[in-house]
Amino acid sequence: MKEDFWKEVGLSESEYELIKEILQREPNEVELGMFGVMWSEHCSYKNSRNVLKQFPTEAPWVLQGPGENAGVIDIGDGQAVAFKIESHNHPSAIEPYQGAATGVGGIIRDIFTMGARPIASLNSLRFGSLKSKKTQYLFSGVVSGIAGYGNRIGVPTVAGEVYFHPSYEDNCLVNAMSVGLMNHEELAKGFASGPGNPVFVVGARTGRDGIHGATFASEELSEATEEKRPAVQAGDPFMEKLLMEACLEVIKTGYVVGMQDMGAAGITSSACEMASRAGTGIEIDVAKVPCREEGMSAYEILLSESQERMLIVVQKGKEKEVQDIFTKWDLEATVIGQVTADGQMTIREGKEIVAQIPAKALTELCPRYDREAKEPEYLAQAQGYDLASLPEMEDYGKVLVTLLGTPTIASKEWVYSQFDYMVGTNTVVPPGSDAAVLRIKGYNKGIAMKVDGNSRYVYLDPYRGGQIAVAEAARNIICTGGKPLAITDCLNFGNPEKPEIFWQFKQAVAGMSEACRVLGTPVVGGNVSLYNETNGEAIYPTPIVGIVGLVEDLAHVTTLGFKQEEDIIILLGITKDELGASTYLSVIHGLEAGKTPEIDLELEKQVQQATLELIKMGLVVSAHDCSEGGLAVALAECCIQGKIGADVALTENIRPSSILFGESQSRIIISINKSKIDLVLQQLKKFQVPYKVLGSVGGDSLNIAGSGWKVNVDVAEMEEKYREAIACLMKG
C-alpha cells in the first residue's frame, strides 16, 4: 500500500490512528478506502451529528424518523407518506446534466426503498448571476437533467424554487426531494437481519463511475475539481423505472427482510449500514457482483456508485421467488453474500478475504467533532448598517416592475415548463403556486408539498433565518389549504472546520429546531451538505426546508390568484419598518445588510391556524404568503396569477419602501367574497390575529395608494416582465 494512502481517501492522520486502534492492526488499501467513504462527512455526518440532535423528531403521526432511507408520516386511512431531500451539489457543479439527473434518481430510490411508490419530485436550486455564461450553462444543464430523469421515470416534478446569487457562481446547489405514498403494512426498512439470510444485489451492473463520490462531496471545490469528473455517475431512468416496479412488487411478497439503495459509497455503505442497524454482520463476495467493465478490483466494486442498484436481504429459502420477480422485470438479481452473526463486514474475492471490519466501526465508531464556533466578523457591521439614511424612490411602480423581473422573484415557468408535472393525473395544484397539491386517488384528500429557504436571511442572522425557513415553508402549505405535518431538510454550508461557518451552521439549526417545536413540524430526515466552497470562498449558508402537509378535503384547496371582481383583500399579520435583508435592498440599492426581519413564532402560529380555519370554513377565495419582495410583489403575483387588478390602500405610518417592499414575517394575503366580510372579521377577532382590510379585486391594473405616494401598474405589464425575465436572459 502506498505510504500516506489515508490522505488520498480523505482521512486525517488522527482518524487513521483511530482506525488502527479499532482494528488492532494496520488496515489494507481496500479497508482504508471503505473507511474513507464511510467516515466522509457525506456519509458519517461527523461534523454535524451532534448539532442535529437539537431537532424535534417525534410526533404521534411520525412512523419513521431520522436514521432510515426516508422519513414516514401517517396521513390516516391506513396510509402513509415517505419523503426525503438530499443534495447533489458537487457533481452538478462539474457535470450539471448527470449530476442533477442522478440526484433525482437517488432520492426516488430512497422513497421506494421504504416501500412507498414515488408520486412527486421537488427541487431547490441555487446558481450565480443569470447574466453569467457559466451560470446559464449550469442552470440549463441542471434543469435538463432533472427533466430528463423525472419525465422518463414517470414521476411528476410538481414544485421547487430557484435563487440566483453571486455566492453560488462556482458552487451551485442542487437539492432534490421525493415524496411517496404507501399503506402502513408496506413499510420496509434497511435491516440485514437473520444470520444465514441471503444478500442480493439487484438492478444495474456495477461500473467504475462514481468511485469516491462521497469523499468528493465532502471536500471544497477548486481548480482541480475538473479532474473529479469521473466521480460523477451516469443515470438510466428506464432502468430505474423497472427497478422501482420490481422492488415494490417484491416488498409486497413479505419475503424482504431489508432493502437499501446503493447511493453514496455504494455496496460498502448499504451493506455496513444494514448490518449495523440490525446488530449483525454481513459477508460479501465481490467476485459474484455483476460488473459491466472488465477487470474491476475489489476496491472499485466496493466503492462504485453506479446508479439503479439495490442491496436486498431476503428470507432464506425464498431466493427463487425473489429472482423470478426481478427476471419478470428484465433485471438481474444475484446472491452475493449472506447475513452473519459475528458483527463483521467481511469482504471476499472468491476464497480470499480482502477486507474485514466490524460493521459498527464504519458507522457508529466514526469520530464526532464539536468544532470551534465563532461569530463572523462581517455580521456586526452588516447588521448595524444605517438603513434610515437610504433615499426613498421617486417611482415605486418602476421599482415593482424591476423586482418582478429579477430572476429570483420572476416566474420559474422557463424551468417547470420542461417538467412533466401532470403525469399520473393526480396534480391538483401544479408549479407556480405557494405549494403543490396531489390528490390521493380513491379519497377526498390530498398531499401538499413545498421546498423553501432564504439564504440572505441566514447570512445576516442564522438563528432567525433558520426560524423563518421553517415558518415560511409551513405558511406555504397553509395557503394551499393543507395542515403542515413534518419536514425534511437539506443543510448546505461551507467548510465546518472554519469557526465562522460552524457558528452559522449551529445557529441555523437551533433556529430551525425552535420553529419546528412551536409549529409542530418534526424533522423526519434530511441531508447535510458541507464544504460548499470554491477556492476558500463559501456559499451563503443555505438551509432548505422540504415540508409535507395534509389537505383533509380537496374542497379546501386554495391558490394564490385573485378570482373575481369586488372580492375583499385582507392582510393577516403586521407590516413593520423592516428593510434589512430584503430583495429590494439587494436589487435596488446593491446592499445585503441590515437585520433579518423579526419573527414571533407564536404570532406565526396564530396567523397560520386562523388562515387554515377560514379556508376550512369555505370563506377564503385566494391565499398567498408575503415573502421575497414584500407586500407589493405578493399583491402583484396575486393579480398576475388571477389576470385581474386590485385597488389597495396602505396607510401605515412608516416609510413607503418598507410598506411596499419590506419583508416582515407572518403575513398572509387572503381575498374573500364581499358578502362574507362580517363573518371573516368576526372570526379573525376570535383568533386574535392582527389584520387590515386592504381594498378590493377588480380592473386591469394594480393600484396602491399611500400617504402622498401611489403605485399604478397594468397587470399586463407586470405579467410580461414577470413571465419573460428568465427566458430573456437565457436567450441573450
Image (cartoon, rainbow, N blue to C red):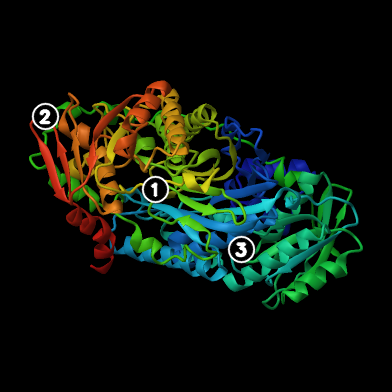
Three-letter code for the amino acid on which mark 1 is drawn: Thr
Give coordinates of residue 282: x percent, y percent: 82, 54
**Looking at the rendering, which quadrant does residue 364 occupy?**
top right
- Does residue 275 sit above or below 607 in this rendering? below
Are dots 2 and 1 in contact, CB under 8 Å?
no
- Does residue 276 sit above or below 176 in this rendering? above
Q: Nearer the viewer, mark 2 or mark 1?
A: 1
Q: Earlier in the sequence, mark 1 or mark 3?
A: 3
Q: In screen coordinates, is 149 left or right of 30?
A: left
The residue under label 3 is: 211
Q: Quadrant of the C terminus?
A: bottom left
Q: Quadrant of the N terminus?
A: bottom right
The residue under label 2 is: 707
Q: CA distance from mark 3 to mark 2?
A: 64 Å
**Looking at the rendering, which quadrant does residue 254 occupy?**
bottom right
In front here: 77 or 412? 77
Label 1 neighbourhood size at 10 Å, few (<14), some (14-19), many (20+)?
Answer: many
- Does residue 24 sit above or below 515 in this rendering? below
Q: Earlier in the sequence, mark 2 or mark 1?
A: 1
Three-letter code for the amino acid on which mark 3 is drawn: Ile
